[in-house]
Image (cartoon, grey):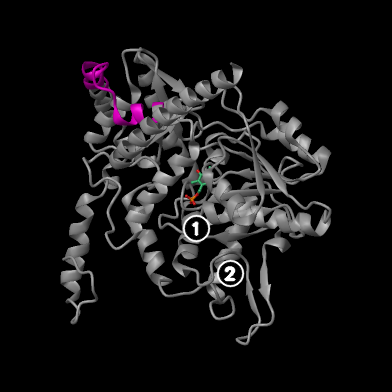
Amino acid sequence: MKEFTLPKQGYPHNEVLKDLEKRKDKDAKWEAGRTFSLVYHTDEEHEDFLQKTYSLYFSANALNPIAFKSVKEMEHETIRMALSLFHGDSKTCGTMTSGGTESLLMVVKTYRDYARKLKPWILKPEMIAPVTIHPAVNKACDYLGVKLKLVSVDHDYKMDVKELRKNISRNTILIMASAPSYPHGVIDPIKEISKISKKKNIPFHVDACFGGFLIPFISPETEFDFSLEGVTSISADFHKYGYSGTKGASGVFYRSMDYLRHQFYIYENWPGGIYLSPSILGSRPGGAVACAYGSLLSLGEEGFLKQATRVKMTLEILVSEIQKIEDLKLVGDQKFGIVCIKSNSHNLDIYLVGDELQKKGWFFDRNQNPESLHFTISPHHDEFIREFIEDLKDSIKEARKKAPHEKSKQASMYGMVANMPLRGVIKNQVLKMMEEMYSASGKNIDEQDGAPQGKLAQTLERVAFEAIEVKKQWNIVKEKIKSKFQK
Ligand SMILES: *Cc1c(COP(=O)(O)O)cnc(C)c1O
């Protein structure tokens, strides 16, 4: 079935369902553990339960808490349960959002407006975060007119606290750090930062979107939440290690209403009545709220602990196997669900290993700094990790055979892109590609050769190459001008 205009007559349900089923063929086989991140799966029983839960609230709209009291109550109880994990008290509060991105957008908006009220002399608000902060924060700052000052990370990929200190100014409205950071799985020095933020009286947000529901169970001794005085807010995703299954559920939590108040939106002059909304979305899926609630309630502490243990054991197996492979090196921290590997040898191109793994059906992320492959472990990976390790070993063999004659597309792309002089050109090319994806042609990034970054890699490689050429030419012209005027 391929329709580009509304069919005159609708298809029967069973045909549409068949079509939907068929389309899945192209997708990553997450049920067979082939995706790292994207789907945080425990087991089929939990999945079935969540599907039933979603169905019960399939049509409920969390937009109107008076019409759907049940959803409002579930949201409240879900937030309170989460806060009890994060050492909240009777003052701490929060709202649910549709995901980590919305949570972080809300955080930046909240503190921007908090500063407008309490520090009205700040005309150009700035926030400080490590370079490893999730790009949703760059997005939030771009959308909201807040300047983002990115500071470097240490050799262990943790936010450089000295750099943080240097960058604090009278315009700083917020400091943000991660627990853990997505690229390398490390927890920034939250305790140290919280001391600084407390002393300087600057709000401090901990982005625990990834690890918020994992750390309390996998590493209970780790301090990252309201137990630290300087932490004023936290974000944590239910649709990741909160195991709410369906996408569309995150939480944003504040130390007190003094902050959360600034997240709310109220418009009192609409002909349609007074409009109030706690976050970005208007209509909100009741099903996503029900699933977050249902997941916490059905798993309980015991269930979360059990899932964390599965993740921990899988991490340990994977790490010990990787340590046995001479040409690989672990990057960052492996305690918090993320394993990141780079090459430890000139003879091994890590992106070539990635290409081979992908051919075998595995989906994962590729870091550009350092050049490495990135895997997030979900509970159900305990069943597939041995298969993965075998495929990883095979992929290394394949990659060794190919290198150094054949450079991976990703390797050459990242290499060139990293050294590319005109950064704006990259953005422009990617923009063009997005225009193509969302225009009438609807082309996919990877209609090329099966490698998901295939087309992007090729385009960027060509552009980077051209930009380097232009820069060379420009340097020649510059030299000519110089010599002419020196004569
Ligand atoms: C996933 C993630 C986000 C963004 O969450 P989405 O649900 O994808 O919008 C933000 N920060 C961190 C650390 C994450 O892992």
User: What is the quadrant of residue 91 in the picture?
Assistant: bottom right
Q: Secondary structure at mark 1?
A: loop
Residue 136 location in percent, x, y? Answer: 54, 48
Q: CA distance from mark 2 to mark 1?
A: 15 Å
Name above or below for residue 3 compared with residue 138: below
User: Is 278 situated left or right of 34 in this image?
Assistant: right
Residue 51 location in percent, x, y? Answer: 36, 62
Residue at figure coordinates x 76%, y 42% from the top left: 229
Residue at figure coordinates x 18%, y 64% from the top left: 19
Identity of the amino acid at label 1? Ala
Mark 1 nearby-residue class (10 Å; few <14, some 14–19, many ≥20): many
Residue at figure coordinates x 69%, y 80% from the top left: 268
| Residue 307 visible in the snapshot | no
- Residue topped by disc 2: 73
Q: What type of secondary structure mainly makes up the magenta span?
A: helix
| Magenta residue check for 402 | yes
Q: Which quadrant would the C terminus be assigned to in this image?
A: top right
User: Is 280 situated left or right of 445 in this image?
Assistant: right
State which region is magenta: 396-415
**Residue 130 got which mark?**
none
| Magenta residue check for 70 | no
User: Is 15 situated left or right of 77 in this image?
Assistant: left
Mark 2 nearby-residue class (10 Å; few <14, some 14–19, many ≥20): some
| Residue 371 visible in the snapshot | yes
Residue 16 location in percent, x, y? Answer: 20, 69
- Residue topped by disc 1: 249
Identity of the amino acid at label 2? Glu
Q: Foreground residue, 126 or 42?
A: 126
